[in-house]
Image (tube, rainbow, N blue to C red):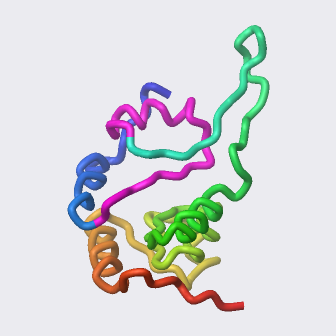
């Protein structure tokens, strides 16, 4: 895992929103043991993830899931605390989170995800994502809540 490299521009991208978005969080369903080298490269952002449990001999025993549907539930709890959420995801396990957020976008999703969820905007490069986030921040009214539909 130490050989994992960030996408070019990832560090700069995470620095970019600080003047306009007060907090950024990363939520992954992957285990922290795989993600730690990435966290080091990103200078340790706030990240929620799962983890592995080892047996007495140090072998993988099981994956500990902190919370089922943690992406969706994290968004819901932050909204309950009056945060407004812009969710960025790329796969099927991000869809509920994106739908729950005030604004949501897919970043470099697979063709299958795009086909299954044409209602979600798609961006493919950091500059497009910056534009989406900038526009979302400008359009959000203070203390607005996404209207839920049945």
Question: Which one is nearer the viewer's eye here, 136 or 113?
Answer: 136
Residue 109: image x %, image y %?
51, 65
Q: Is residue 85 left or right of residue 97?
A: left
Q: Nearer the viewer, residue 106 or 56?
A: 56
Q: Position of residue 73 (x, y in %)?
A: 64, 62
Q: Residue at x 53, y 70 (%)?
A: 79
Asked where in the image residue 142 lies, by quadrant, the reply is: bottom left
Question: Which corner quadrant holds the C terminus?
Answer: bottom right
Q: Is residue 105 magenta?
A: no
Q: Is residue 34 magenta?
A: yes
- Frontmost residue, 50 versus 116: 50
- Res. 134 image quadrant: bottom left
> Residue 14: where, in percent of width, then height?
30, 53
Residue that protrudes farthest toward the top in the picture: 57
Residue 37 pos. (x, y %): 43, 30
Give the answer, above or below, for where 69 lies relative to 64.
below
Foreground residue among 148 and 61: 148
- Name the residue at 58% across, 43% down: 49
Residue extending farthest to the front is: 81
| Region in magenta | 21-44
**Is 115 left or right of 8, judged from the image as shown?**
right
14 lies above or below 102: above
Above or below, 61 relative to 89 = above
**Does 11 sit left or right of 122 as displayed?**
left
Q: Is residue 96 left or right of residue 125?
A: right
At a point 52% along the width and 67% down the height, the residue shown is 81
* Tally of numbered tags: 0
Up/down of 38 relative to 13, above or below: above
């Amino acid at each position: 895992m130490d050989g994992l490299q960030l996408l070019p521009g990832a560090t700069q991208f995470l620095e970019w929103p600080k003047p306009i978005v007060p907090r950024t969080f990363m939520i992954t369903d992957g285990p922290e043991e795989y993600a730690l080298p990435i966290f080091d490269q990103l200078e340790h952002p706030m990240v929620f993830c799962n983890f592995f449990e080892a047996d007495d001999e140090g072998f993988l025993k099981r994956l500990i899931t902190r919370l089922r549907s943690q992406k969706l539930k994290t968004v819901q709890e932050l909204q309950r605390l009056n945060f407004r959420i812009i969710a960025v995801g790329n796969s099927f396990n991000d869809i509920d989170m994106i739908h729950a957020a005030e604004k949501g976008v897919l970043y470099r999703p697979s063709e299958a995800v795009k086909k299954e969820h044409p209602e979600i905007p798609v961006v493919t490069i950091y500059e497009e994502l910056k534009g989406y986030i900038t526009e979302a921040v400008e359009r959000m009214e203070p203390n607005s809540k996404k209207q839920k539909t049945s």
